[in-house]
Image (cartoon, grey):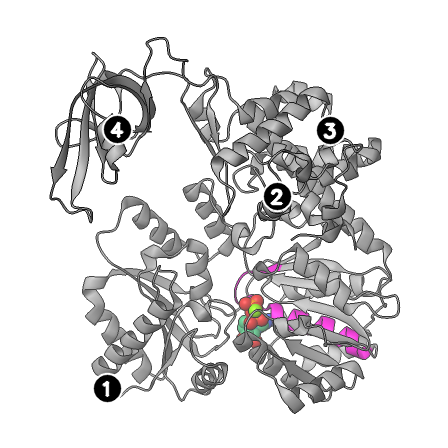
């Protein structure tokens, strides 16, 4: 997110250089500056912290005889033979081949695109220095389109003095420009010094180099630096930066929390009698886990500081009814509550729940599809508070949505909402000096240590047990070749009065393809199971159609629901008891777990059939075995973490939950404890360091601080 504030952070050179705008550098005018912003680079300092993605070793010439397949290397030799060959599969129909030898071996250079000048230059006897990737070809080692330079003089300047950095770039800002700008920034760094914020004791204890040194090294690693360590982000210089970045993030969230806590919220209270009444009217008894969490929430709501709580509970653990208790406290206190869901299907479903539980209270559903007069009348009801409970999608964010007395904001299925959205919510709900309480609900299982970092601005509640009477879903893994057996099973289940999901998954990003595949599957299934009423939902259907199909499925008119992964999040049809997932080997464990969570919600014994296309790799087998072995989201998350290693368990990358330069809270989780301790130390002992540190790493996201 770009903020005008950070752009204004002066372009005058009187400021410490760290805060100077990149425009003070040679070669940066307004247009380049605008492009750099896309990389989060506003100030000179940001360039220093724009660390290379990887490195190329051009510091030494590698003997051709020792080249390994896949190795990127500089080689040097003489052209022994060059020829243009015609034919072949390439478009141009010809290629230039140069055999280069250095006495230890030889390399074949292949150029599919070349001009007359190149052809004239690359002839027998010419000495070349090349950089490229060595590959084992048919007869010998090859390099396709290497970078090359003609050598005229035996003593020609030796290769690079340090490893060559490769940066993340963006359109219009190429590698050479970035390298040049970083070098200018490093030059300035030579004259002035960057503040060191990591306590000396920590530097010592973990063998971290000082900031200045680390930055130098990371942009220009000397030849003896281990590329292996750098590639795995394990070099002490990287570890140090990772540590500092995690620290900055932690501090920013703690600060955010402190700021929010200083604000006023309306106290919401619920009498024991009202609570009893509500619970008594439910069609089930709340579990002890739900009760505990409700207690925690009601405690928070009764305080004059805004609640900021994350509620985590596995799929099907019953978070919605917990949310309803919070809503009850708001409406009982004469205030408004808003509940936001990530999709219209879910919003619709929540709306259904709330209408049912609060039949006496006016509920409004606001989604993107509300238009014209209808929308206006809803907005009016929200603005004059005749609507006490407002359920919606992102549409709730829109400018013209104004609440009269919003006192509670609930966000369901949090993994699609990042810190920024949380902040936007606060703004939305501000009324006469108060900000709303916030409850954020997620089914993404996160180990506690991670949660404490990713959500350091939030309190944390967990529903750690499913409602009793649930039978764990039985999971089987079946090869695509035994599809017929699966069909028979679906037919039998539906004949027995059960309902089933059939989930089509395609790994392709294209939604069009996914939807086509689902349509095709529905057609084939209908042919195979002629008597069965089959419905279809996918992402490209109109919202009305989707809702209609889901509704019919809920009512039992549709027995088999063919779907893309749109049903992944939250759809609740307790009578469904069979889930078939195609191409299961291609999905992440967390996603499979979410999908499977759609069944096993009633008291019936439910089953999940994971279909895979053989051959299945060993890892693939292991992964599916994890699902067969457990129904616990936490166990699955933990295994996923172990098996994927540095992965994206949280999906933080996509959500922007924590956008970091170099750290990865999953891969670098082992630092979190120390980071926690150190951040507390800094807050207490060196409060003056907090802002600069946050600014250094999150400068472009200054909204963090502006609540
Ligand atoms: P999630 O946590 O995945 O959002 P839901 O709130 O949708 O779960 O609840 C899943 C299902 O379990 C719903 O049908 C809900 O009515 C039911 N449910 C919730 N709490 C209980 C309970 N204590 N006992 C029995 N069923 C419950
Ligand atoms: Mg839910």
Separation of residues labelled 1 and 3 (CA atoms): 70 Å
Q: Which residue is mark 1?
A: 530
Single out the mark in the foreground, 1 or 3. Answer: 3
Query: Neighbour class for label 1 at 10 Å: few (<14), some, many (≥20)?
Result: few
Q: Which residue is mark 4?
A: 69
Q: Say whether disc 3 or disc 4 marks the residue closer to the N-terminus.
A: 4
Tally the marks: 4
Q: Which residue is mark 3?
A: 197
Dominant SS type (magenta): helix
Query: Neighbour class for label 4 at 10 Å: few (<14), some, many (≥20)?
Result: few
Q: Give SS at disc 1.
A: loop
Q: Say whether disc 4 or disc 1 marks the residue closer to the N-terminus.
A: 4
Numbered tag placed on residue 449 in the rendering: 2
Single out the mark in the foreground, 2 or 3. Answer: 3
Separation of residues labelled 2 and 3 (CA atoms): 24 Å
Q: Residue at x 66, y 46 (%)?
A: 452
Separation of residues labelled 2 and 1 (CA atoms): 51 Å
Numbered tag placed on residue 123 in the rendering: none
Q: Residue at x 42, y 75 (%)?
A: 540
Single out the mark in the foreground, 4 or 1. Answer: 4
Horizontal and vertical percent position of residue 547: 49, 83
Q: Say whether disc 1 or disc 3 marks the residue closer to the N-terminus.
A: 3
Horizontal and vertical percent position of residue 240: 61, 28
């Amino acid at each position: 997110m770009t903020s005008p504030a950070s752009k204004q952070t002066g372009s005058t050179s009187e400021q410490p250089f760290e805060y100077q705008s990149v425009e003070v550098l040679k070669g940066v005018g307004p247009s380049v500056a605008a492009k750099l912003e896309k990389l989060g680079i506003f100030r000179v300092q940001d360039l220093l912290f724009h660390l290379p993605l990887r490195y190329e070793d051009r510091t030494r010439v590698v003997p051709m005889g020792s080249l390994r397949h896949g190795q990127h290397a500089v080689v040097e030799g003489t052209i022994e033979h060059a020829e243009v060959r015609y034919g072949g599969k390439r478009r141009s129909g010809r290629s230039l081949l140069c055999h280069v030898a250095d006495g230890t071996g030889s390399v074949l250079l292949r150029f599919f695109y070349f001009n007359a000048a190149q052809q004239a230059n690359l002839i027998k006897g010419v000495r070349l220095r090349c950089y490229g990737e060595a590959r084992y070809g048919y007869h010998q080692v090859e390099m396709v389109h290497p970078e090359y330079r003609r050598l005229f003089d035996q003593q020609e300047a030796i290769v690079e003095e340090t490893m060559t950095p490769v940066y993340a770039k963006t359109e219009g800002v190429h590698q050479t420009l970035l390298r040049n700008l970083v070098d200018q920034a490093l030059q300035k760094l030579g004259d002035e010094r960057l503040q060191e914020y990591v306590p000396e004791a920590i530097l010592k204890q973990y063998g971290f180099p000082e900031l200045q040194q680390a930055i130098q090294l990371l942009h220009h690693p000397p030849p003896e630096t281990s590329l292996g360590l750098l590639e795995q982000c394990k070099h002490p210089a990287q570890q140090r930066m990772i540590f500092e970045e995690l620290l900055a993030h932690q501090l920013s969230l703690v600060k955010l929390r402190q700021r929010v806590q200083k604000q006023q919220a309306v106290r919401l209270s619920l009498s024991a009698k009202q609570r009893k009444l509500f619970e008594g009217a439910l069609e089930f008894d709340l579990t002890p886990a739900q009760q505990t969490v409700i207690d925690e929430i009601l405690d928070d709501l009764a305080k004059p500081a805004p609640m900021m709580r994350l509620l985590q509970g596995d799929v099907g653990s019953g978070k919605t009814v917990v949310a309803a208790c919070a809503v009850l406290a708001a409406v009982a206190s004469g205030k408004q509550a808003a509940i936001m869901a990530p999709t219209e299907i879910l919003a619709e479903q929540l709306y259904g729940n709330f209408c049912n539980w609060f039949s006496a209270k006016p509920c409004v559903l606001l989604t993107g599809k509300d238009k014209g007069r209808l929308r206006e009348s809803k907005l009016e009801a929200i603005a004059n508070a005749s609507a006490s409970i407002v359920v919606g999608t992102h549409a709730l964010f829109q400018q013209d949505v104004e609440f009269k007395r919003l006192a509670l904001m609930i966000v369901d299925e949090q993994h699609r909402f990042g810190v920024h959205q949380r902040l936007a919510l606060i703004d939305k709900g501000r009324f006469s000096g108060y900000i709303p309480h916030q409850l954020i609900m997620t089914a993404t299982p996160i180990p506690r240590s991670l949660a404490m970092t990713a959500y350091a601005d939030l309190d944390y509640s967990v529903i750690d047990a499913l409602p009793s009477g649930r039978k764990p879903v039985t999971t089987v893994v079946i090869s695509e070749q035994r599809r017929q057996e699966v069909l028979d099973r679906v037919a039998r289940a539906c004949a027995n009065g059960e309902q089933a999901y059939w989930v089509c998954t395609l790994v392709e990003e294209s939604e069009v393809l996914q939807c086509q595949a689902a349509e095709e599957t529905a057609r084939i299934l209908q042919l195979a199971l002629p008597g069965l009423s089959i419905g279809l939902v996918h992402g490209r259907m109109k919202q009305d159609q989707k809702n209609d199909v889901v509704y019919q499925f809920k009512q039992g008119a549709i027995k088999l629901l063919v779907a893309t992964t749109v049903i992944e999040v939250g759809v609740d049809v307790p009578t469904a008891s069979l889930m078939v997932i195609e191409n299961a080997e291609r999905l992440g464990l967390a996603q499979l777990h979410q999908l499977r969570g759609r069944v096993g919600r009633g008291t019936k014994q439910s089953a999940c059939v994971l279909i895979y296309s053989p051959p299945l790799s060993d890892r693939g087998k292991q992964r599916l075995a994890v699902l067969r072995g457990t129904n616990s989201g936490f166990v699955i998350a933990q295994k996923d973490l172990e098996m994927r290693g540095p992965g994206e368990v949280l999906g933080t990358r996509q959500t922007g939950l924590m956008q970091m330069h170099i750290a990865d809270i999953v891969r670098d989780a082992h630092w979190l404890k120390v980071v926690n301790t150190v951040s507390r130390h800094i807050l207490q002992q060196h409060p003056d360091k907090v802002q600069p540190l946050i600014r250094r790493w999150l400068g472009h996201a200054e909204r963090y601080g502006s609540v």
